[in-house]
Each structure stands twice: as C-alpha cells, then as structure tokens.
Amino acid sequence: RLDDVYAFVDGYIDFLNHCKTERETVAFCEKTLRAHGFGDDPKGKRYLKTLRGKCLFAFRKGTEPMSSGISLVAAHADCPRLDFKQHPFVEEAGFAQGKTHYYGGLRKYQWLSRPLALHGVICRDDGSTVPVCIGEEPGDPLFTIADLLPHLAHDQVTKSIKDAFEGEKLNVILGNRPKDEPEDAKDKAETPVKQAILELLQKKYGVSEEDFITAEIEVVPAGRAGYVGFDRSLVGGYGQDDRICVYTALMALCEAGDSAAKNMALMVWDKEEIGSEGATGASSRFISYCFEDVTRAHEPETPVGHVFLATQALSADVTAGMDPDYQETHEKHNSANLGFGPCFEKYTGSGGKYSASEAHAEYYASVRGVFNRKAIPWQAGELGRVDHGGGGTVALFLAAYGMNVVDCGPALLAMHSPFELSSVVDIYACFEAYRAFYEA
Ligand code: MN
Ligand code: MN
C-alpha cells in the first residue's frame, strides 16, 4: 500500500520538475489527457479545451443527464514568481541585470542568493515564438539575485522586513563580461556588458531586445523537487500551491472508473495568485462557454443555467498546515496538519469571513459522506487564527454560478516559498479523494 503511495508520488515529483509555469502545466495536462482519450469534439465522451495555453477544461460524460449537473474539480496552475519587466535589460556597475516585477504574494527575501531559472516565451513581431527554459538541465547556466553581505547590512537589519527588501532590487544577474571592443575604438558602448548579453541572445536564440517587450519570462527557483526527511515522508519543491491539486485531480479524472454515473470535469485556471482576473482567470467567462459547449453537445434542450445550478464542485487548493515553529499563528483546534489527508475549508476570506463564499452545510456533509464511505482520511480547518491574515481561493467564482462548492485540498508548510513542503500520504489521499468525488 505504501508502495502505491510512493509510485504515485514519484510521478508527482517528476511532474513538478517539468512544470514550473502555468503554460508548462497546462501543456502537461493536455498531453496526459490526450493520452487518455480526451479530444476536441464536445460531443465526445472525453473532451478538452484550452485557452491561450494557460487554462484548461476537461470533461468526461457520465451516464447521468446533463441536467443532473457536473462533478467539477477546479485548481490553479499559476504560482508566485518573478516576471521579467517589458524593458528588463539594464547594466549597473558592470553587471547586466534583468529587472523583474513580482507575481503573487511572495516574501521577497526568499528569492535572494539562490539558484534561479528562466522559463517562458519570447514572441517576435512576425508571429514566431521562442520557448525558453534555461537553468534546469545539467550544463545550463544558472541565474540569481545577489543578497547583501552581512558586513554591510547593519542599516538593513534594523528595518522592518517590509522596508528592508525592495521590489526594485529584485534584479536578476545575467552577466558580467563586457563586449569585446578594440582599445582605441571611438564610440565605445556605454553599457558594454548589456550589449554583450544582447548580442549573445541574438546569436544564440535569434531574439532582439525589442522582442523581450513582448515576452513572458518567468524567473523561478532552479533545481529539482524531491523527498524531504530521513523517512521521506514529505515532498519539497517549488509550485506545489496549487500544482499538487492540478496533478492529483488530473490523475483522478483520468483514472476514474468508466462505469461512473457522474458527468465529470476538471478546470485548471491561471491568475489565481493575483486575484483571478484576466481571460484565463477564474472570473472570466471561459468556464461558462465550456459548460455551454458540453451541454449543447449532449443535451441541447437543457438550459446551461440548470446545469450550473445542479453542479457540485470542489475548489481544490492548498491550505496552511500547522507550522512547528510558528504554532502561534494557527488556532490548533481548527488548523490543518500535514499527514492527515485533504483539508476541507468551509469558508476562506479574512477579517470576519470577508470575501468568503461559504459552503452550504448540506453539500459539505454529502462530500464528507463520500470520503467516509471510502475510508479516505480528511480533516477540517481554516487558514490561521482569526484576524491574523487569511486568503482566498477560486471557490467564490464557482459559487457565483449557483453551484455547490467547498474548498478541499492538502496542507502545505512554507506555502508560496521557493521550496514548499507537502506530505506524501496527503498527496495520495487527495488523489483518492478527488477520484471518489468523481465516482460518487
Ligand atoms: Mn492556491
Ligand atoms: Mn497561493
């Protein structure tokens, strides 16, 4: 049984190593779904649709009518990171640097003096696109943001964390060697290191400085995810919020039994970490277009609003696990613990449940019943002490359609850090929980 768990988690670690951006994650999901018979025809029993390569809807037709609704699991594939600005290239004190604007809620100091990799796309004006992934393969160069040495940090250490680490100092070192120029050259380059880097990029990748204006380069932690602890009870790696739910829900959808009665769907969204706005975020119309497509294909007489109202959803996202070093930030009777299975959150939000779409008790109980009947471990908690912070998920965007929805996902330690921790048994329990939800 533990062998099954580790075989599954080996696959998850491999997924984390190959999927460090929303684009890479959606591409992985699409490839996996196609290998499991999902195709482009909404009339088919297994259908998938992507948008801009950044969000994805997958559907499996069950034996029940569309008017009975869909069992939907929704997760997000975007993660906190540093994005290159439109004009990234600068030269200061002999260093070519890439200027960034951080994406999502991150603690800036965690990104300093650690190996970083560049992932993304550079789009030329002729319509061609250059994919980028540098810093992951052996032999690749790495990138980094140099932190201040302690010897010169005497002023900095007396500041609050908020003031001590500035967003405009999150500049990635790209190089240090000036362009080769003759000693007596008349018009010497003002920024010879930056020029040398740009020439290298032109030669090696065929991209100009202007091409970077229309690029999406994400600076992410370089290196591999892996087991943590002598007992290998944990998984450490970047991007587990919320790719842990993407992977477990994807596998659940692919492996749910063919005799299942429920119509099933998986929604993978982008932009959750910055408020779910945008065409590929949860507040967009994309999911309603997808519901319309499958409803029209299978049951044109049923108004799509009826399908929405009958739909049952899990907002599959992570929560904060009890942290051994910061126990005072949790309320121990209502906190999640790593290793105890997926955690339900009846509500999220902060400051008096503000912005929460609270789950209805009747629906919540029905999902609890599904897990109990399959002896799947689960827990119930909320994110931190009252009035000590909080957070949101995509649940409210699903609830806006009138569907039943409850948050359900694993607990992490060091959430939003470059090396988040999850529990091996929780990963497998989430897979089992989502599969049970689909098969119920
Ligand atoms: Mn999340
Ligand atoms: Mn998050």
Image (spheres, rainbow, N blue to C red):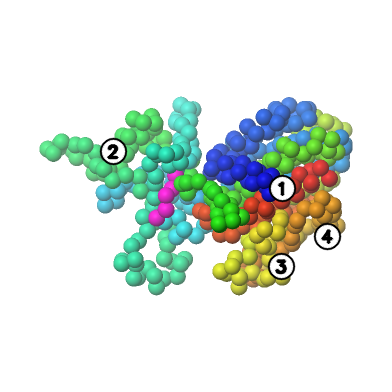
Q: Is residue 391 above or below residue 35?
A: below
Q: Nearer the viewer, mark 1 or mark 2?
A: 1
Instruction: Give the mark, 3 or 2, whose residue is nearer the N terminus.
Output: 2
Front tag of 1 and 4: 1
Q: Which residue is more in the foreground, 13 or 289?
A: 13
**Local crowd size for mark 1, using a 10 Å CA cut-off: few (<14), some (14–19), many (≥20):** few
Q: Is mark 2 within 8 Å of ligand 2?
A: no
**SS assignment at label 3:** helix
Q: Residue at x 60, y 43 (%)?
A: 10
Q: Which residue is mark 4?
A: 361
Please state if 118 lies on the left or on the right of 339 as rendered.
left
Dot 2 corresponds to which residue?
196
C-alpha separation, residue under disc 1 versus residue under disc 4:
33 Å
Give the residue at x 55% y 57%. 230
Quick check: marks 1 and 3 in contact, CB under 8 Å? Answer: no
Front-most of 201 and 439?
A: 439
Q: Secondary structure at mark 4?
A: helix
Q: Earlier in the sequence, mark 1 or mark 3?
A: 1
Instruction: Tell me the residue at 24%/38% (across/down).
Output: 179
Q: What amino acid type should be assigned to the residue bearing mark 1?
A: Arg
What's the mark number on residue 1? 1
Counting other residues with Cα less than 10 Å from the Cα at mark 4, is it few (<14), some (14-19), or many (20 or more)? few
Q: CA distance from mark 3 to mark 4?
A: 17 Å
Work out how far the residue at label 3 is from the one at label 2, CA to CA, in angstroms.
56 Å
